[in-house]
Image (cartoon, rainbow, N blue to C red):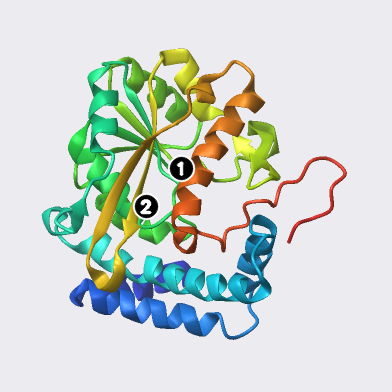
Amino acid sequence: MWSRDACRAALVRAVLRLLAWLPLRYSQGIGGAVGRTIALFPNGLRRVAEINLASCFPELSARSRRRLLAQTLAETGKTAAEIGALWLWPAERVLALVREVPGDEVLTRALSQGKGLILACPHLGAWELAGLYCATRCKLTALYRPPRMSALDAMIRSARERSGARLVPTDAAGIRALFQALRRGDAVGILPDQDPGRERGVFAPFFGISTNTMILISRLAASTGAPVVIVYAERLPCGAGYSMRFTPAPEDIADADPVTAAAALNRAVEGCVRARPEQYQWTYKRFKTRPAGEQRYY
Protein backbone atom coordinates (compact mmCIF):
# COMPACT_ATOMS: atom_id res chain seq x y z
CA MET A 1 0.00 0.00 0.00
CA TRP A 2 1.39 3.39 -1.00
CA SER A 3 2.09 6.01 1.60
CA ARG A 4 0.65 9.51 1.29
CA ASP A 5 4.13 10.79 0.39
CA ALA A 6 4.46 8.23 -2.41
CA CYS A 7 1.01 9.09 -3.78
CA ARG A 8 1.77 12.80 -3.82
CA ALA A 9 5.12 12.19 -5.48
CA ALA A 10 3.49 10.04 -8.16
CA LEU A 11 1.01 12.85 -8.87
CA VAL A 12 3.83 15.42 -9.08
CA ARG A 13 5.78 13.21 -11.48
CA ALA A 14 2.70 12.75 -13.66
CA VAL A 15 2.05 16.50 -13.82
CA LEU A 16 5.70 17.22 -14.62
CA ARG A 17 5.72 14.65 -17.42
CA LEU A 18 2.58 16.21 -18.86
CA LEU A 19 4.13 19.68 -18.73
CA ALA A 20 7.37 18.36 -20.24
CA TRP A 21 5.37 17.07 -23.21
CA LEU A 22 4.33 20.62 -24.06
CA PRO A 23 6.43 23.27 -25.81
CA LEU A 24 8.00 25.64 -23.29
CA ARG A 25 5.80 28.60 -24.26
CA TYR A 26 2.68 26.55 -23.52
CA SER A 27 3.84 25.21 -20.15
CA GLN A 28 4.96 28.69 -19.10
CA GLY A 29 1.66 30.07 -20.35
CA ILE A 30 -0.24 27.64 -18.14
CA GLY A 31 1.93 28.49 -15.16
CA GLY A 32 1.53 32.21 -15.75
CA ALA A 33 -2.25 31.87 -15.90
CA VAL A 34 -2.32 29.91 -12.65
CA GLY A 35 -0.11 32.52 -10.99
CA ARG A 36 -2.28 35.41 -12.14
CA THR A 37 -5.31 33.58 -10.77
CA ILE A 38 -3.59 33.13 -7.41
CA ALA A 39 -3.01 36.88 -7.35
CA LEU A 40 -6.76 37.52 -7.43
CA PHE A 41 -7.70 35.82 -4.15
CA PRO A 42 -6.42 35.94 -0.54
CA ASN A 43 -3.95 33.10 0.08
CA GLY A 44 -0.64 32.41 1.77
CA LEU A 45 1.57 32.93 -1.26
CA ARG A 46 -0.01 36.26 -2.11
CA ARG A 47 0.20 37.43 1.51
CA VAL A 48 3.94 36.71 1.81
CA ALA A 49 4.67 38.34 -1.55
CA GLU A 50 2.61 41.42 -0.59
CA ILE A 51 4.55 41.84 2.65
CA ASN A 52 7.92 41.41 0.93
CA LEU A 53 7.14 43.80 -1.91
CA ALA A 54 5.74 46.48 0.42
CA SER A 55 8.87 46.23 2.57
CA CYS A 56 11.40 46.20 -0.26
CA PHE A 57 9.77 48.74 -2.58
CA PRO A 58 8.23 51.38 -0.27
CA GLU A 59 8.82 54.00 -2.96
CA LEU A 60 6.27 52.38 -5.30
CA SER A 61 2.66 53.49 -5.32
CA ALA A 62 0.01 51.02 -4.18
CA ARG A 63 -1.07 50.60 -7.82
CA SER A 64 2.49 49.85 -8.97
CA ARG A 65 2.97 47.30 -6.21
CA ARG A 66 -0.28 45.56 -7.16
CA ARG A 67 0.96 45.35 -10.73
CA LEU A 68 4.32 43.98 -9.58
CA LEU A 69 2.53 41.48 -7.32
CA ALA A 70 0.50 40.13 -10.24
CA GLN A 71 3.64 39.90 -12.39
CA THR A 72 5.53 38.19 -9.56
CA LEU A 73 2.91 35.50 -9.02
CA ALA A 74 2.64 34.94 -12.78
CA GLU A 75 6.41 34.39 -12.92
CA THR A 76 6.20 32.13 -9.87
CA GLY A 77 3.68 30.03 -11.79
CA LYS A 78 6.06 29.88 -14.74
CA THR A 79 8.88 28.78 -12.44
CA ALA A 80 6.80 25.82 -11.28
CA ALA A 81 5.44 24.91 -14.71
CA GLU A 82 8.78 24.99 -16.54
CA ILE A 83 10.26 22.43 -14.13
CA GLY A 84 8.85 19.64 -16.30
CA ALA A 85 11.02 20.76 -19.22
CA LEU A 86 14.07 21.70 -17.16
CA TRP A 87 14.14 18.38 -15.31
CA LEU A 88 12.91 15.92 -17.91
CA TRP A 89 14.03 17.13 -21.33
CA PRO A 90 17.42 15.85 -22.53
CA ALA A 91 20.17 18.15 -21.28
CA GLU A 92 21.11 19.22 -24.81
CA ARG A 93 17.57 20.36 -25.52
CA VAL A 94 17.40 22.37 -22.30
CA LEU A 95 20.80 23.98 -22.82
CA ALA A 96 19.75 25.04 -26.33
CA LEU A 97 17.24 27.36 -24.61
CA VAL A 98 20.13 29.60 -23.47
CA ARG A 99 19.96 32.31 -26.13
CA GLU A 100 22.65 34.65 -24.83
CA VAL A 101 25.26 34.82 -22.06
CA PRO A 102 25.83 38.44 -20.95
CA GLY A 103 28.89 38.57 -18.72
CA ASP A 104 30.45 35.42 -20.19
CA GLU A 105 33.83 37.14 -19.92
CA VAL A 106 33.28 37.42 -16.15
CA LEU A 107 32.97 33.64 -15.88
CA THR A 108 35.91 33.02 -18.21
CA ARG A 109 38.16 35.43 -16.32
CA ALA A 110 37.24 33.93 -12.94
CA LEU A 111 37.93 30.39 -14.14
CA SER A 112 41.29 31.43 -15.61
CA GLN A 113 42.58 32.43 -12.16
CA GLY A 114 42.91 28.78 -11.19
CA LYS A 115 41.75 29.38 -7.62
CA GLY A 116 38.41 27.65 -7.95
CA LEU A 117 35.15 29.52 -8.37
CA ILE A 118 32.15 30.22 -6.14
CA LEU A 119 28.93 30.56 -8.13
CA ALA A 120 26.17 32.26 -6.14
CA CYS A 121 22.80 31.64 -7.78
CA PRO A 122 19.88 33.54 -6.17
CA HIS A 123 16.25 32.48 -6.52
CA LEU A 124 15.80 34.66 -9.57
CA GLY A 125 14.51 33.48 -12.94
CA ALA A 126 15.17 29.82 -13.75
CA TRP A 127 17.73 28.84 -11.12
CA GLU A 128 17.40 25.15 -12.05
CA LEU A 129 18.76 25.99 -15.50
CA ALA A 130 21.65 28.02 -14.07
CA GLY A 131 23.09 24.97 -12.34
CA LEU A 132 22.65 22.78 -15.38
CA TYR A 133 24.40 25.32 -17.61
CA CYS A 134 27.29 26.06 -15.25
CA ALA A 135 28.12 22.35 -14.94
CA THR A 136 28.89 22.34 -18.67
CA ARG A 137 31.42 25.18 -18.25
CA CYS A 138 33.31 23.90 -15.21
CA LYS A 139 33.53 20.99 -12.79
CA LEU A 140 30.76 21.86 -10.34
CA THR A 141 29.96 20.75 -6.80
CA ALA A 142 26.66 22.09 -5.44
CA LEU A 143 24.89 21.98 -2.09
CA TYR A 144 21.68 19.96 -2.11
CA ARG A 145 18.89 19.73 0.42
CA PRO A 146 16.64 16.67 -0.12
CA PRO A 147 12.97 17.50 -0.78
CA ARG A 148 10.25 17.05 1.80
CA MET A 149 8.71 14.45 -0.52
CA SER A 150 11.51 11.89 -0.22
CA ALA A 151 10.04 9.90 -3.11
CA LEU A 152 11.08 12.73 -5.46
CA ASP A 153 14.71 12.67 -4.36
CA ALA A 154 16.01 10.34 -7.08
CA MET A 155 14.22 12.31 -9.80
CA ILE A 156 15.64 15.64 -8.63
CA ARG A 157 19.16 14.29 -8.23
CA SER A 158 19.10 12.79 -11.70
CA ALA A 159 17.84 16.06 -13.19
CA ARG A 160 20.43 18.26 -11.49
CA GLU A 161 23.39 15.97 -12.06
CA ARG A 162 22.75 15.07 -15.70
CA SER A 163 25.13 17.67 -17.14
CA GLY A 164 27.98 16.73 -14.79
CA ALA A 165 27.29 18.46 -11.47
CA ARG A 166 27.99 16.70 -8.20
CA LEU A 167 25.49 17.25 -5.37
CA VAL A 168 26.57 17.21 -1.73
CA PRO A 169 24.39 17.49 1.40
CA THR A 170 23.86 20.66 3.41
CA ASP A 171 25.76 19.33 6.43
CA ALA A 172 29.33 19.30 7.74
CA ALA A 173 30.39 16.68 5.19
CA GLY A 174 28.94 18.76 2.37
CA ILE A 175 30.73 21.91 3.56
CA ARG A 176 34.03 20.00 3.65
CA ALA A 177 33.36 18.83 0.10
CA LEU A 178 32.97 22.47 -1.01
CA PHE A 179 36.33 23.46 0.50
CA GLN A 180 37.98 20.43 -1.10
CA ALA A 181 36.49 21.23 -4.50
CA LEU A 182 37.77 24.81 -4.39
CA ARG A 183 41.25 23.67 -3.38
CA ARG A 184 41.27 21.41 -6.44
CA GLY A 185 40.44 24.44 -8.57
CA ASP A 186 36.84 23.35 -9.19
CA ALA A 187 33.67 25.42 -8.92
CA VAL A 188 31.00 25.26 -6.22
CA GLY A 189 27.37 26.36 -6.48
CA ILE A 190 25.38 27.87 -3.61
CA LEU A 191 21.98 29.53 -3.29
CA PRO A 192 22.91 32.72 -1.41
CA ASP A 193 19.49 34.05 -0.43
CA GLN A 194 18.07 31.38 1.86
CA ASP A 195 17.63 31.95 5.59
CA PRO A 196 20.53 29.95 7.10
CA GLY A 197 19.03 29.81 10.57
CA ARG A 198 19.91 31.97 13.53
CA GLU A 199 23.10 30.06 14.40
CA ARG A 200 24.65 30.09 10.91
CA GLY A 201 24.10 33.63 9.73
CA VAL A 202 24.56 37.29 10.54
CA PHE A 203 22.21 40.22 10.04
CA ALA A 204 23.05 42.49 7.11
CA PRO A 205 20.99 44.87 4.94
CA PHE A 206 18.97 43.50 2.04
CA PHE A 207 16.71 46.09 0.43
CA GLY A 208 17.36 48.15 3.54
CA ILE A 209 16.03 45.42 5.85
CA SER A 210 18.18 43.69 8.46
CA THR A 211 18.25 40.16 7.01
CA ASN A 212 19.69 36.92 8.35
CA THR A 213 22.38 36.14 5.78
CA MET A 214 24.66 33.15 5.27
CA ILE A 215 28.37 33.49 6.03
CA LEU A 216 29.39 30.33 4.15
CA ILE A 217 30.21 32.08 0.88
CA SER A 218 32.47 34.65 2.55
CA ARG A 219 34.21 31.89 4.54
CA LEU A 220 34.87 29.92 1.38
CA ALA A 221 36.16 32.97 -0.48
CA ALA A 222 38.38 34.17 2.37
CA SER A 223 39.86 30.72 3.01
CA THR A 224 40.60 29.72 -0.59
CA GLY A 225 40.95 33.00 -2.49
CA ALA A 226 38.32 31.80 -4.95
CA PRO A 227 36.46 34.57 -6.80
CA VAL A 228 32.69 34.87 -6.36
CA VAL A 229 30.42 35.30 -9.37
CA ILE A 230 26.65 35.88 -9.27
CA VAL A 231 24.70 33.95 -11.89
CA TYR A 232 21.03 33.83 -12.83
CA ALA A 233 18.97 32.70 -15.81
CA GLU A 234 16.60 35.47 -16.85
CA ARG A 235 13.36 34.16 -18.35
CA LEU A 236 12.71 35.68 -21.78
CA PRO A 237 9.15 36.55 -22.91
CA CYS A 238 6.78 34.16 -24.68
CA GLY A 239 8.78 31.01 -24.03
CA ALA A 240 11.68 32.31 -26.13
CA GLY A 241 14.30 30.83 -23.79
CA TYR A 242 16.70 32.33 -21.27
CA SER A 243 19.50 34.83 -20.86
CA MET A 244 22.28 33.41 -18.66
CA ARG A 245 23.79 36.37 -16.81
CA PHE A 246 27.08 36.51 -14.89
CA THR A 247 28.20 39.44 -12.72
CA PRO A 248 31.22 39.73 -10.40
CA ALA A 249 30.59 40.02 -6.68
CA PRO A 250 32.02 42.99 -4.73
CA GLU A 251 35.57 42.47 -3.45
CA ASP A 252 34.52 42.89 0.18
CA ILE A 253 32.46 39.71 -0.04
CA ALA A 254 35.57 38.02 1.42
CA ASP A 255 36.05 40.63 4.15
CA ALA A 256 37.21 39.39 7.55
CA ASP A 257 34.23 41.11 9.16
CA PRO A 258 31.26 38.75 8.58
CA VAL A 259 28.71 41.58 8.57
CA THR A 260 30.66 43.51 5.93
CA ALA A 261 30.97 40.36 3.83
CA ALA A 262 27.27 39.50 4.21
CA ALA A 263 26.29 43.04 3.25
CA ALA A 264 28.40 42.74 0.09
CA LEU A 265 26.68 39.46 -0.80
CA ASN A 266 23.23 40.96 -0.26
CA ARG A 267 24.18 44.03 -2.28
CA ALA A 268 25.20 41.84 -5.22
CA VAL A 269 21.99 39.81 -5.07
CA GLU A 270 19.87 42.95 -4.69
CA GLY A 271 21.43 44.45 -7.81
CA CYS A 272 20.35 41.44 -9.86
CA VAL A 273 16.87 41.40 -8.33
CA ARG A 274 16.31 45.08 -9.09
CA ALA A 275 17.04 44.36 -12.75
CA ARG A 276 14.15 41.83 -12.95
CA PRO A 277 12.15 42.15 -9.71
CA GLU A 278 9.11 40.26 -11.03
CA GLN A 279 11.23 37.11 -11.50
CA TYR A 280 12.44 36.95 -7.90
CA GLN A 281 10.95 34.45 -5.43
CA TRP A 282 9.02 36.97 -3.33
CA THR A 283 6.79 34.16 -2.03
CA TYR A 284 9.69 32.98 0.18
CA LYS A 285 9.76 34.17 3.81
CA ARG A 286 13.18 35.76 3.45
CA PHE A 287 12.82 37.91 6.59
CA LYS A 288 11.38 35.28 8.94
CA THR A 289 14.37 35.29 11.32
CA ARG A 290 14.47 38.65 13.10
CA PRO A 291 17.02 40.31 15.39
CA ALA A 292 16.33 39.79 19.08
CA GLY A 293 13.39 41.85 20.25
CA GLU A 294 11.85 42.44 16.83
CA GLN A 295 8.32 41.25 16.14
CA ARG A 296 7.54 38.52 13.59
CA TYR A 297 7.52 39.62 9.98
CA TYR A 298 4.87 37.29 8.59
Q: Residue at x 23, y 20 (%)?
A: 112
At label 1, counting other C-alpha atoms closer than 10 Å, the crowd grade (few under 14, some 14-19, many 20 or more) is some
> Circle 2 — which element?
helix
Q: Amino acid at mark 2?
A: Trp
The front one of 217 and 142 is 217
In the picture, measured across the screen, residue 61 lies left or right of residue 239, that is right
Residue 215 horizontal/vertical position (percent)? 57, 29
Q: Sequence order check: which comes first, mark 2 or mark 1?
A: 2
**Residue at mark 2:** 127
Mark 2 burial class by Cα count in 10 Å: few <14, some 14-19, many 20+: many
Which residue, given by chain and number where applicable, does mark 1 sit on?
191
- Viewed as shown, does residue 142 lie left or right of 223? left
Question: In the rendered structure, are the residues bearing label 2 and label 1 in contact, judged by CB atoms less than 8 Å apart?
Answer: yes
Tag 1: residue type?
A: Leu
Q: Quadrant of residue 267?
A: top right
Report x, y in % for residue 65.
61, 70
Nearer the observer, 161 or 114? 114
